[in-house]
Each structure stands twice: as C-alpha cells, then as structure tokens.
Image (cartoon, grey):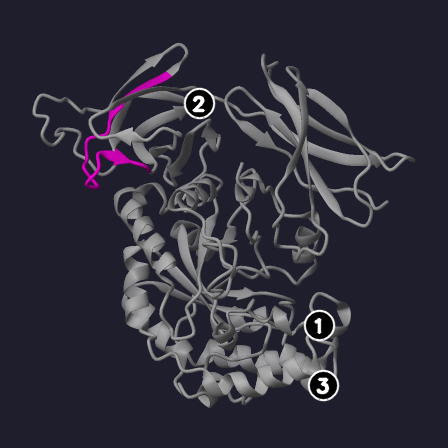
Amino acid sequence: MKKWYLAGMLSLVFSLAVSAQSADQNKPERLEWFRDQGLGMFVHWSIDSQLGVIISHSLAGASDDYVDRFYHELPKTFDPTHFDPDAMARLAKVAGVRYMVFTTKHHNGFCMWDTKSTDFNIMKTPYGKDITKELFTSFRKQGIATGVYFSPDDFLWLHENGKQIQRLVPEVQPGVNPGLLARDQKQMTELMTRYGTVSMAFFDGEAKGLRDIVWKEQPDAVVTRGAIETPEQNVPGAPLKGAWEANMTMGTSWGYQPTSDVYKSDHDLLEILIHTRSRGGNLLLNVSPKPDGSLPVEQEDRLRTLGLWMFINGEAIYGTRPWVVTNEGDYWFTRSKDNKALYVIVDTPETWRRGRVRDFVLKTVRATTTTKASFLGQNDQVVEYAPKAHPQTTFEQQTDGLHVHAVRAQRLQDSDVWPYPSVIKLTDVEEAFVPPVVHTLPAVAGADGSFTLSGSWSGDASTPGAKVAFQYRIITGEDTKSRLHGWQGISSQPAEKPGTYRTMLPKLESGEVYEYRMVLQHPLLTLYGEEVTLPSR
C-alpha cells in the first residue's frame, strides 16, 4: 500500500496543541465556504531554491560559515527571470484550483514581499519586485482566492540574537521572545493591510498573538493551521469534524529539489484528492517553483492531468460533503451539501475502456421513486464510431443493494483506455447503512517492553466476516502535523460481534516513539480508530 494512503488521523498531541490556543474566531459561514473549495494550490518558494536544498531546514545545525553565506550571498543571486505569475495563475485555473496559499515567509526568515521589518526580503535582490503582490494580483484575476503562509519561527532573528537555530523547542518560540513576536506581528500586519482581500492564513508554528491580527484586519479570512486541523503528508483514515485541510507535496519535497524529488503518479494525486474529499477535507497541493520562477515540468504535467479530470468531474469535488461511508471498496463517495446528489467515484484497478460496460452493486445506497443516474462528462447517448451502442446509465434496486449499469462512452484521449477514476452521479437516493463506530483504546505496557493494544467497535448488529487488526508506525522527531512513515500491520483476528479486542505488540526498537490505531475490516469498507501514542518505555 502507498504510505500516504496508510496514514491516519492527526496525532493527539496536535489536537491538544490547537485546543490550547485562544478560542477559534473563524466565522462559521466562512468555514462552510472554505469546505466548498475542495482544491487549493500551495506554493513553496524561497531563496534557497537556488541550491536545490530543503527549504529553510538546512540552517538548523549548520556551521557559522554556512549560515553567514546563506544570509549574505543568496539574496545577491536570486533573480527569477522566468517568473510569470499570470501563466502560473492560468495553469492553476485550468487545474481546477479554487484557492492559493503562498509562502510569504518560511522559517529562514526571507520575506517574499516589500517589508519594512527587515532587509532580508525580495526587494533587496536583483529581482527587486514584490512577488507576493504579483502572485496575489494574478491569481485574483483568475477568480482564485489568495492566502498567506507565514512562519512565526524566524531563523534569521534567532541568528541575529545569538540563539541556536532550531524549531519546536520552548526557548525559540515567539511567546518567550518578545523581539521575535514583535517582528512577526509587524510583518503580519503588513500582509493583512497592504495586499487586499486575504482569504486564508496558514501559521506554520505558534499562532498565538498573530492570528488575532488576521481576524481583526481580515474578518472574513479563515485561519487554517493554527485554528483547524491540517494534516501534512497524510490523509486521515476517517472524516474529521468540520472544516479541515490536507497538505500534500507532488513528490517528496516542499521546495524545489531538482535531483532528489520522487514524484507521485497522476493517479496517486487523483486518489489523494478523492480520498480527502470523501472524508470532508480540502486538498492543498504543493508546487515548488525553480529559482528562475518557472515550474518543474513534472509539476506542470501533473497539474494539467488534474485539470482534465476536474474539468469533467469537478462537480463531485466542489461543494461536497461526506456520505454515510467514505467508500465501498473501490467505489468512493461524495455528496452535494444539499443532499440531492451522490457521486460514486469508480477507482478500480483495471482501466475502463471506452465502450465497455461496468455493473456493480452499492450496499449503502437505496433508490427512491425520483432517483436518476448519469455519467459525468458524457451525454449517455453516443459512443463514437459505435452507432449501435446504447451507453445509457441505469440502475435497479434489489434486495442485496442498488445495481448500477454504466458504459464509458466519452473519448478523452487518443487511446480508448481511460486510466483514471470515473464518476457516476445518482440523485435523490437514501442511506441504506449505518456504519459501525471504531475506537482505539489506551495501550498497556508490559514489563518486558511489549504492549497490549486495545480497541473496540460498536454497531446495531453482528457482522459476519468482520475482522479487527492493529497498525503502528514510528513518529520520532516528527512535526506534530506531519506523518512520513507508513503503517505496519499486525495480523487480523475475527471480530464479528461488537466489543473490545486486543492483541500483543512485541518489544519495539528502543529510543523510538510510536503511535497505533485499531482497524475494523468490515465487509463493506475499512474503518479506523483514533491514533494513540504508545506509552513511553
């Protein structure tokens, strides 16, 4: 299985960190607007793109010589002569993007706008133009909402003030460094008052003392990270409550890394989008401009494939909410927020050739007297060069579920093979299933270093064929919002009746931190419990 797919819900640590901050002042109606957007573009770009090095983090643990040259030499050579914000915005529009979030300042402290707070900014480079303003202007012309990524951590301020460059330790947080907080507040005030309407703000660090500036100066803005859940490099295993956003790279890197990035396939990215929306979240998909301002060809190509799919199937992504279940096997669901339409996203391993029939049964869906069925993108009347074909999408309610008959009729590529998911639209249908509820329970540590893992599931009735399994993964050194390691499974056991189930986890590697969850393998779908951190040993 793919690592991104195996990732589960956010860690308890991050949930507690969010709740510990001041009360969320996002307007409910704006959160609903945000949930409707579906797809955003994250833009990670800074002066270290010139080196093809990880954005900002190379400064942590770096020698004095490296740090000095980073801050004094890189600004002198940053001149993105092929930067075309209008072209980037047009590409985003074609790709189906509804909002954009730009790294105005990453952890390294370099400001990609005309700031008065520091000379370490874009105006002091050979380029000498306000990139934030240029991007915001171009994306707004395309009707795309604009947002600010801002790092409260500032490695330049730490360096200037004789502090060790690092993150996520108390002594470097703005809350205990009045000078850093004052600089952050000045910068955030500039961004919120000089660049027109800002629709969202993403704080990659301590948001206290900063997000209130957003709500004061831009009361309709949605604060994402810093107020709502924003899993990074993973998609939760179950729908999260309310508005949330998954942040994902196209490859393995956030910033431009020309030789070390390993890209996800087009199909992987579509699956990530579909799974995120089926669980009620937005996908903020990252791009990383090259030092000359252009996008890597691998990223542009994937955006155009995404654009084709969204041009046909965007109705199943925008303005949708979760169905009673996320999926029945390879059939994934979203529904319109007025509950009038259910979208069945068919993502089976075998490709669906043009002119071929698919018949499948949905167990969680029941037809009504007014139900209709259609195939997004096609008129269900014509298969080109096959005048005798009858590609009508039909259905029949039977005792074992809703039987759907569909034909892929539209020609989208020179080949008759369409390798991506297809979408069937059903209107006026009812729920025919109440899913079980799964919980992960606290683990018990044994004297020998092993653990007893526990979880439970509850439901209205026994379920023949149901099984329970447990999964665990390393989270040592992870940012609380990020999960890079895949899950490892422990063999399943029969679990046909609701109740509590346990298993033994042998002694794990010393010095590592782990989390685990229970998994219910129901005959219709797989359900996940919460992620729980294993007790320290």
The part of the image, by quadrant, that contains residue 333 is top left
Secondary element type, mark 3: loop
Q: Which residues are magenta?
A: 402-419
Question: Residue placed at 64% from the left, 81% from the top?
Answer: 67
Mark 2 surroundings within 10 Å by alpha-carbon count, few (fewer than 14), some (14 through 19), many (20 or more): some
Mark 1 to mark 3: distance in Å? 16 Å
Question: Residue placed at 47% from the left, 89% from the top?
Answer: 124
Circle 1 or circle 3, nearest the eye: 1
In the rendered image, the quadrant that contains the N terminus is top right
Please say if the residues under marks 2 and 3 sit with CB atoms less than 8 Å apart: no
Return the residue found at the far top: 399
Mark 2 to mark 1: distance in Å? 53 Å
Return the residue found at the far front: 259
Looking at numbered disc 3 in the image, what kind of residue is underneath it? Answer: Asn
Asked whether 409 falls inside the magenta stretch, the response is yes
Q: Earlier in the sequence, mark 2 or mark 1?
A: 1
Front residue of 428/130: it is 130
Q: Is residue 329 left or right of residue 240?
A: left
Q: Which residue is mark 3?
A: 161
Looking at numbered disc 2 in the image, what kind of residue is underneath it? Answer: Thr
Q: Is residue 120 visible?
A: no
Residue 121 in the image: above or below residue 507? below
Mark 1 surroundings within 10 Å by alpha-carbon count, few (fewer than 14), some (14 through 19), many (20 or more): few
Q: Label for residue 364? A: 2
Q: Which residue is mark 1?
A: 61
Residue 523 in the image: above or below residue 170? above
Secondary element type, mark 1: loop
Q: Is residue 426 visible?
A: yes
